[in-house]
Image (spheres, rainbow, N blue to C red):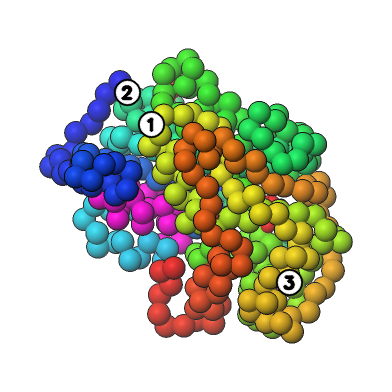
Amino acid sequence: RRMTYELHNPIYVNIGGKVPMGLKRKSLRIVVTGGAGFVGSHLVDRLLERGDSVIVVDNFFTGRKENLLHQLKNPRFELIRHDVVEPILLEVDQIYHLACPASPTNVVGTLNMLGLAKRVGARFLLTSTSEVYGDPLQHPQVETYWGNVNPIGVRSCYDEGKRVAETLTMDYHRGLNVEARIARIFNTYGPRMCLDDGRVVSNFVAQALRKEPLTVYGDGKQTRSFQYVSDLVEGLMRLMEGDHIGPFNLGNPGEFTMLELAQVVQDTIDPNAKIEYRPNTEDDPHKRKPDIAKAKKLLGWEPKVSLREGLPLMVNDFKQRLFGDEKESTG
Ligand code: NAD
Ligand code: UDP
Ligand code: UDP
């Protein structure tokens, strides 16, 4: 690390099970871009709980202030409304870069955060995606697989944007000595997930709760691997703290067809929920399942929460947001 910024009042914190009992390390200043979003807000909770100081940079494009309401009074927490497409000056030790709309602006935002990391000597973690594998010709997907992405397809803005973000991250690492970490995240679900972005888990759960039919696209035989958000956050933190750049697949290897997922949703929420078939979207990957041997070996990480255990954990949060329970959802 080229430069370490000291906190004004350094406090020493115990980082839990990761170091031998009694060993403490200095509290870090951490920026989480996209911290008002689904994954980011859970990550922020864990980092604050651990004793670090957290700055969230978010333009509330898809994120919500409600996801962080319970932290607003925390003196170690700061929320900045800012679009990462615009440069920003901060003094921090670590950058978790999650901010990302499905558009080319994710490249500019990544460039700015890498520039920031370079200037202050912060460690930079990119949340990339399993989408970099495209419609994979190798199954399950190993990190060494280069992927099968259509560069001019309807999904390519997101896929190629993340691929460029990975390239930039590696270039800043190799050429400019930025300490880099890359996570390739597979489908993740849990409380605070966006209600209306059309993801399959949020769609099915919301549909079942509203007593609407579950919309299965295509024949429903395409597969995905669904990871519970707390497992992902644990993986991201281990990656950031560890010595390995990656990329690392972070996902749950349990593989489900969309019809099997619908069955789990029926069993969990409403056994009478009907299924309605809809035409599938273009370029939809047929299957997706992470090989997580690398993360297991080098990060000592593997998911703990199965789909059948995790799905019920998001139902109350969805009920509150859908049907306007007066209590705030804190997940
Ligand atoms: P999300 O939409 O809930 O969170 C993204 C956050 O980034 C939001 O709060 C949004 O307001 C913010 N944001 C977007 N553009 C911004 C900009 N230009 N400036 C500042 N803030 C901006 O999504 P999520 O599911 O929490 O995803 C977090 C990260 O993980 C993303 O980078 C996403 O690509 C990646 N990822 C997620 C999944 C998943 O299944 N959830 C899978 C693969 C990768
Ligand atoms: N940047 C930023 N905050 C910083 C340092 C840089 O937002 O603290 C932005 C900067 O404005 C530029 C990008 O990050 O658009 C890349 O910065 P870098 O210094 O790597 O590139 P350069 O400015 O030399 O082209
Ligand atoms: N899907 C579905 N019904 C829905 C939404 C999505 O059957 O209401 C399917 C979609 O066609 C895809 C899978 O679920 O095959 C996962 O879609 P999602 O957008 O959640 O994740 P991604 O395709 O990005 O992995």
Q: CA distance from mark 1 to mark 3?
A: 42 Å
> Would you say 255 lies left or right of 162 here?
right
Q: Residue at x 76, y 77 (%)?
A: 213
Compared with residue 124, is residue 47 higher up or lower down, i.e. above or below?
A: below
Q: Are marks 2 and 1 in contact (CB under 8 Å)?
A: yes
Residue at x 24%, y 62% (from the top left corner): 73
Assess whether residue 51 is covered by the magenta stretch. Answer: yes
Question: Residue 224 at what x, y percent from top left?
Answer: 71, 53
Of residues 329 and 222, the one nearer the viewer is: 222
Q: Which residue is mark 3?
A: 263
Which residue is denoted by mark 2 in the rendering? Answer: 1
Q: Amino acid type of disc 1?
A: Arg
- Residue 311 drawn at (x, y percent): 58, 68
Q: Which residue is mark 1?
A: 123
Extent of the magenta region: 39-65
Disc 2 from disc 3: Cα separation: 49 Å
Q: Position of residue 25 (x, y in %)?
A: 22, 39
User: Is any atom of residue 157 visible in this view?
Assistant: no
Element assignment for label 3: helix
